Amino acid sequence: MRVNEDRLRSDIESNAEFGAVPCREGRGRTVLTGTEADRRAREFLCERLRDAGLDTRIDEVGNVVGRWTPESADPDAAPVAAGSHLDSVPEGGIFDGPLGVYAALESVRTMQDAGVEPSRPVEVVCFTEEEGQRFGGGLVGSGVAAGELSVEEALGIEDGDGIPLGDALADIGFRGEGRVDAADWDAWIELHVEQAERLERADVPAGVVTTIVGLTRCAVEVVGEADHAGSTPMDDRSDALAAASEFVLDVERATNERRSVSETAVGTVGKLDVSPNAPNVVPGRASLSIDVRDVDYESIDHVVGRARDSLARIERERPVETTLERPWDRRPVAMDDRPRAALHAAGEAADVPTLDLHSGAAHDTMHVAQVTDAALLFAPSRDGISHNPREWTDWSDCAAATRVLAGALADLASE
Ligand code: CO
């Protein structure tokens, strides 16, 4: 089987025109769900799916599916599916999402060109609102496909202006019918850019993901008392920011220490709001976030526990009150052996080296993995950069990873 690198590149470059933003370095695009750029990207995809002879359908939440049912296939057999998303973050890169969608299509075209005769249909999928930049927290389309979110719930998610997702999709002509059900798939594979540097450093074009990390987000409040920065003596203060600063360092220390047990643990305080945030006022309140991730759920619990301990200590040592809430918690998701084995075998057959690694970022595949055998394949990201116009994956690496994807899909679809 020969992947056509130029054809794949041409699709991704054409897609990059939709929502293209001028930038000094790299190539950026802004494709938010339900916008004109989104409509054009989706219409172009449908056109390319039809060009390859696939039957396309759009479900009620705008998920797009193109189905290839060759003569060799039993049309009633559970299909093998692959894909990703076409939406982006504001001024995002051109590969994050589109690579997986167009590599899936290129895989089908490669099988067609090679005369592969699968016994199952193969589906190419584009999920709605993966990035969560306009509606909700992201992974919306895949959440519906996996039954984690109802169609009604998804359609009702409102953007910042109170426009529901359902209306935004109807506006661009992509509120279809029914629900794509990921449980109908025999297996699923998503190709995505790595968004880290492990593949680049190893000089390997394809990474087979073992686990997608679990993630916890906590909201922390530190309450002291706002006071005059000039007339309040040092020993009479209740400085919320000074207290919060100790906490930030404690979270970093706790995570670093945990790495001796699980080296993939990461913990971040990425958001800090100080009130009243004025140079001549002792800070009265600090609101912080914690984001903890690991392939090992116990590590997440451990770091959150240490964060609670830190707050208890700070309350003892300083005149502040604190709270910690844990509103968002997601367990790690292991990828399935069967599609992973197919990826390894395909890498060997195509003479493309592969590397096992974990995913630190969330992906639609997390949802799909709840209802069918799912795998995630990574292509290298130059310097690990993504969500940025400088995001880059060499075309030869795109093609090499697609060779692995195509081989695995052909194998799974012939079972
Ligand atoms: Co993505």
Image: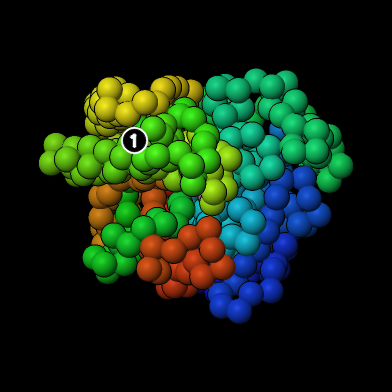
Residue at point 44%, 63% (across, down): 385
Residue sitting nearer the eye, 191 or 224: 224
Which quadrant, please, contains the C terminus? Answer: top left
Residue at point 68%, 37% (across, down): 135
Question: Of helix, strand and loop, which one carries label 1?
Answer: helix
Residue 1 at x, y percent in the picture:
42, 62
> Does residue 314 appear in the picture of this structure?
yes
Mark 1, ligand 1, within 8 Å: the answer is no
Residue 389 at x, y percent in the picture:
56, 68
Q: Residue furthest front?
A: 231
Q: Residue furthest left?
A: 260
Q: Residue furthest bottom?
A: 24
User: Crowding at label 1, few (<14), some or many (≥20) Cα neighbours within 10 Å?
Assistant: few
Q: Kindly identify the amino acid type of the residue bearing the numbered disc 1.
A: Asp
> Does residue 410 appear in the picture of this structure?
no
Residue at point 70%, 50% (across, down): 32
Residue at point 45%, 39% (across, down): 232
Write down the residue under mark 1.
235
Residue 163 at x, y percent in the picture:
81, 35
Residue sitting nearer the eye, 167 or 325: 325
Above or below — where is 252 with respect to 29? above
In the rendered view, how is the structure colored? Answer: rainbow
Q: Answer left or right for 51 relative to 237.
A: right
Residue sitting nearer the eye, 384 or 174: 384
For residue 355, which quarter of the picture?
bottom left
Residue 8 at x, y percent in the picture:
56, 66
